[in-house]
């Protein structure tokens, strides 16, 4: 997504383009910063939420992403990468930091390691478990494959948008998408192979 | 539907199929994803529901951002490069704090549970320690009691440790006495008391505390020790010889202390260090009818205290201050007198029957024989019997 694109919308300042909002945010306008945050918070949270195993961590990392945004705004260039892409890169870096920290200090018995996503009234427990199984399968893919699939099918970005955000060509994105979906289908047992993705969650 | 394994089914074909069934830009998912497992996997992923941050969390994070922005921009509304750098440093510091707080919330939840468990454990531990105070050897909680004592010693200064050692010795004797009351004789408890006395004296020798005061306490405790041993029927061999040795050490330490600090001309005698003729312990541990009655089994004679007087006390030279043995504790020979050979007597014992060395009772060496079992038996003090 490019700064200032026509489809951009924010609820706090509906008449202001994203580029203008970013300019004001860089100048210290806290309402502009809040507007940018409100625009992207759920997308960033969804992305992080699919990448990490529990809600509490997703919540914390989302907060961290936007704090980094506030820190980095003075250095952000409107002529560089799209603002949204910049946020996703911050988010991806925070997720990588999280797993690096997990490797250094494994927390085998943390209660939050068990997914604790709330089940909405309109969705049954089984449905929620299926969602968790899909997320668990997704997390077995490489970081790049996860990013592509989340942006493509959770955020419903086009191949071009995903290529823009990840700084790759559309061809590379399509090729990686092909491999990622092939692997995900296997993990989900959709190609008649064993339901590997359920292993460790339920039989 | 294309065959996913056919060579022509490449990434572009899959992309086209996905664009058709899962168009970007909206949340629409085709009702018929077809047979391609890749498309079906993508459809499953797209179907949702997707996680969403709740309103409270959204507001909380926004408040954090506004606070961070305030720090960054408040003092520098018109940003120049220097201001930005200054602000960045400040906001970075603030953000670290906020991040720490945010990231640590997961920890906080875990720590809160740990804290709750610890609180329960502390309460339980406190209750256990309190309950263990009255425990006796053999009780389940007795090891806790001893463990707490060791902890107290470990944390105490030398002076405090000295007091504690004497207190613990007294505690061991109490325990022995309580066990005795229910017919359970445990000589090991008496040994523990001796260990505490030894530890106390070791501290005295290192210059801790008042030697005279300690000597007095040690003598009283040792006397009680011997008396309890006799009441409990612990044989002479079961009473540790070092009880006497301990008393001697205490007495020596006290005498040395006096020589160092007191004009000996003004205080030629150290009789003041002697134990009371009728010590409080005797009244405490014996029924009134038993005191002074040599015929009662378990009767404690003067030998008990004599034994613990030790032979090094200048006053304990085989006779009391009046030149005879001091009054026996049971009072059977108030003025002392020559004891029959082999019965333990003071000065004038036949060769080989009294050497004036503080030894355990019933050694037949003149330093205070076994408990008197008949009237008239000498209970002369240990100490000065000549070979």
Image (cartoon, rainbow, N blue to C red):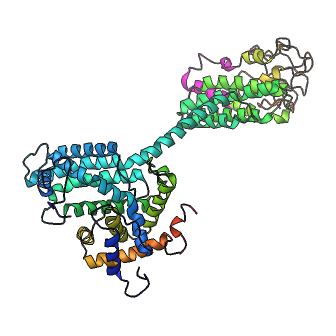
Residue B251 is a magenta residue = yes
Q: Is residue B87 visible?
A: yes
Residue B130 appears at what percent x and percent y? Answer: 63, 28
Question: Which residue is at the front of the view, A179 or B278?
Answer: A179
Question: Which residue is at the front of the view, B178 or B206?
Answer: B178
Quadrant containing the C terminus of chain A is: bottom right
**From the viewer's perspective, is B144 left or right of B352?**
left
Q: Quadrant of residue A171?
A: bottom left
Going by the picture, which residue comes out furthest to the front? B31
Q: Quadrant of residue B70?
A: top left
**Height in image: B95 above or below B258?**
below
Range covered by the magenta-colored residues: B249-278
In the rendered picture of this protein, how many numbered marks are placed on residues? 0
**Height in image: B283 above or below B78?**
above
**From the viewer's perspective, is B310 left or right of B130?**
right
**Height in image: A164 above or below B143?**
below
Q: Quadrant of residue A174?
A: bottom left
Residue A55 appears at what percent x and percent y? Answer: 41, 52
**Height in image: B181 above or below A164?**
above
Residue B299 appears at what percent x and percent y? Answer: 86, 20
Residue B138 is a magenta residue = no
């Amino acid at each position: 997504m490019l700064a200032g694109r026509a489809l951009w919308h924010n609820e706090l300042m509906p008449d202001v383009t994203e580029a203008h909002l970013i300019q004001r945010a860089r100048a210290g306008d806290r309402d502009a910063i809040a507007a940018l945050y409100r625009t992207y918070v759920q997308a960033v949270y969804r992305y992080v939420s699919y990448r990490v195993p529990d809600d509490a961590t997703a919540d914390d990392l989302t907060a961290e992403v936007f704090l980094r945004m506030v820190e980095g705004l003075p250095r952000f260039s409107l002529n560089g990468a799209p603002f949204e892409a910049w946020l996703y890169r911050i988010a991806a870096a925070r997720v990588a930091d999280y797993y690096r920290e997990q490797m250094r200090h494994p927390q085998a018995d943390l209660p939050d390691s068990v997914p604790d996503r709330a089940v909405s009234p309109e969705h049954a427990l089984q449905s929620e478990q299926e969602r968790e199984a899909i997320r668990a399968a997704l997390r077995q893919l490489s970081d790049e494959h996860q990013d592509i699939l989340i942006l493509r099918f959770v955020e419903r970005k086009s191949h071009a948008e995903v290529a823009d955000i990840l700084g790759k060509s559309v061809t590379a994105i399509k090729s990686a998408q092909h491999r990622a979906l092939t692997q995900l289908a296997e993990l989900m047992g959709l190609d008649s192979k064993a339901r590997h993705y359920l292993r460790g969650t339920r039989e | 539907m294309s065959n996913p394994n056919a060579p022509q089914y490449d990434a572009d074909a899959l992309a086209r199929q996905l664009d058709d069934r899962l168009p970007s830009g909206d949340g629409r998912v085709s009702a018929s994803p077809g047979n391609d497992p890749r498309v079906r996997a993508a459809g499953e992923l797209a179907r949702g529901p997707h996680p969403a941050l709740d309103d409270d969390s959204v507001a909380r994070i926004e408040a954090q951002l506004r606070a961070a922005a305030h720090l960054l921009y408040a003092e520098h509304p018109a940003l120049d490069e220097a201001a930005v750098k200054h602000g960045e440093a400040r906001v970075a510091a603030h953000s670290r704090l906020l991040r720490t707080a945010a990231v640590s919330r997961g920890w906080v939840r875990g720590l809160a549970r740990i804290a709750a468990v610890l609180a329960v454990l502390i309460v339980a531990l406190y209750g256990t320690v309190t309950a263990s105070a009255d425990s006796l050897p053999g009780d389940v909680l007795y090891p806790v009691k001893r463990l707490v004592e060791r902890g107290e010693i470990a944390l105490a200064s030398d002076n405090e440790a000295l007091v504690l050692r004497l207190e613990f010795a007294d505690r061991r004797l109490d325990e022995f006495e309580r066990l005795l009351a229910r017919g359970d004789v445990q000589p090991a408890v008496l040994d523990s008391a001796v260990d505490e006395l030894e530890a106390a004296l070791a501290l005295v020798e290192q210059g801790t505390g008042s030697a005279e005061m300690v000597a007095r306490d040690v003598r009283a405790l040792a006397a009680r020790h011997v008396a309890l041993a006799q009441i409990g029927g612990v044989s002479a061999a079961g009473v540790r010889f070092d009880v006497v040795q301990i008393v001697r050490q205490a007495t020596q330490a006290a005498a040395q202390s006096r020589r160092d600090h007191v004009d000996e001309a003004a205080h030629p005698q150290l009789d003041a260090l002697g134990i009371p003729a009728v010590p409080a312990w005797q009244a405490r541990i014996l029924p009134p009818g038993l005191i002074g009655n040599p015929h009662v089994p378990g009767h404690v004679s003067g030998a008990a205290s004599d034994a613990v007087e030790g032979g090094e006390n200048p006053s304990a030279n085989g006779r009391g201050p009046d030149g005879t043995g001091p009054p026996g504790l049971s009072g059977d020979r108030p003025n002392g007198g020559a004891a029959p050979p082999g019965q333990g007597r003071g000065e004038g014992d036949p060769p080989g029957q009294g050497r004036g060395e503080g030894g355990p009772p019933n050694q037949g060496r003149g330093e205070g024989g076994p408990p008197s079992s008949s009237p008239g038996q000498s209970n002369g003090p240990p100490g000065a019997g000549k070979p």
